[in-house]
Amino acid sequence: MSLDFDALRKKLNTLQGQNDRKSALWKPPEGSSIVRLVPWKERADNPFIELYFHYLGRKTHLSPITHGKPDPIAEFADKLRSTGDKDDWNFSKQFSPKLRTFVPIIVRGEEDKGVRFWGFGKMVYTELLQVINDEDWGDISDPQSGHDVSVDFIPEKKSDTAYAQTKCLVKPKETPLSKDAEQVKKWLTEQPDIDEIFEEPSYEELATFLEKFLTPEGGEDTSVTATTKGEASSAEAVVEDKPEVKTAKVKTKAKTASAVEETDEGNSSDVAEEFEKLFNE
């Protein structure tokens, strides 16, 4: 039997891509770290990069709405919400894209690793924006007169809440990004490409994934149909009618319980917590 070199080459590329992603992303370790926000080379006047993700069945996909494109999973969520049914509304939450914000940083003490991207949720994003919008602080990412940020990370198992915590404290003293002008120039121009770190799946790929997620192998067909671009329907992920939505929901819950624990009232919070763990653990 001859080796399938195409399959092996594809696997190698996947593993190399995973390694590249790992080296390009920074997750705060337990305890305190000092980081410095760096102007993004693609948009110097705003270092924050907003990306939207789907997290379903332990798989994460970048949502095309990040770049203003149609997203069949988000459209399916919209269809569920449009029924006006409370159960459908709750069920739809797990299909709505979730925001994750990234910012290029230098980690103090690890300057040799170069610029990496730090991803965080709404609370950290809000805290940092509030500081920047405060005239007493201003642009904390400025290479000459910016401020370092202390990041304290408490993992879930040691937190006094039900989830991990990230606390930020902006240092009051202004400091340069580096005293070495050549080093600063390198950090401002040589940064990972975030579009390569998180590749955007095609509309058809997401539609196929959604259909498989809702109709797991060995499961019965549901009323959900993911059509492809160009077909007659204006909505590529459609629901035939309200009663069938409920039928699809029951079947999906029975077949995907091992992937995401679901309840009518608490499903969205479960998905959100798992989403956070993906980035923080």
Image (spheres, rainbow, N blue to C red):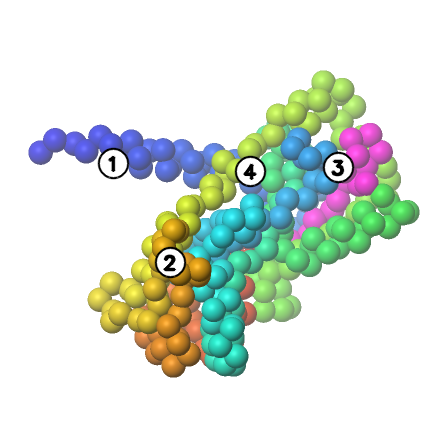
Q: Earlier in the sequence, mark 1 or mark 2?
A: 1
Nearest to the eye among marks 1 and 2: give it.
Answer: 2
Give amino acid for label 1: Ala
Q: Which secondary structure, mark 4?
A: helix
The label number, if any, that marks residue 87 in the structure image: none
Quadrant hosting residue 35: top right
Residue 141 vs residue 90, the one in the foreground? 90
Where does residue 111 sit, x and y in percent of width and height? 65, 30
| Closer to viewer: mark 3 or mark 4 | 3
Distance of mark 2 from mark 4, alpha carbons? Answer: 35 Å
The CA span between labels 3 and 1 is 43 Å
Residue 98, magenta (yes or no): no
Q: Secondary structure at mark 2?
A: loop
Q: CA distance from mark 1 to mark 2?
A: 36 Å
Is residue 147 in the magenta section?
yes
Work out whether residue 257 can be spotted: no
User: Would you say the residues marked 4 and 1 are in contact, meaning their CB atoms lie under 8 Å apart?
Assistant: no
The residue identified by callout 2 is 232
- Residue that carries the numbered disc 1 in the rendered image: 7
Q: Which residues are magenta?
A: 139-153
- The residue under label 4 is 194
Q: Residue at left 36%, top 77%?
A: 244
Residue type at mark 3? Asp
For residue 126, side relative to residue 268 (left or right): right
- Tell me what residue is drawn at x 75 percent, y 44 percent: 149
**In this image, 202 relative to 120: left or right?**
left
Measuring 70% from the left and 40% from the top, which residue is drawn there?
Answer: 47
What's the amino acid at mark 4? Answer: Ile
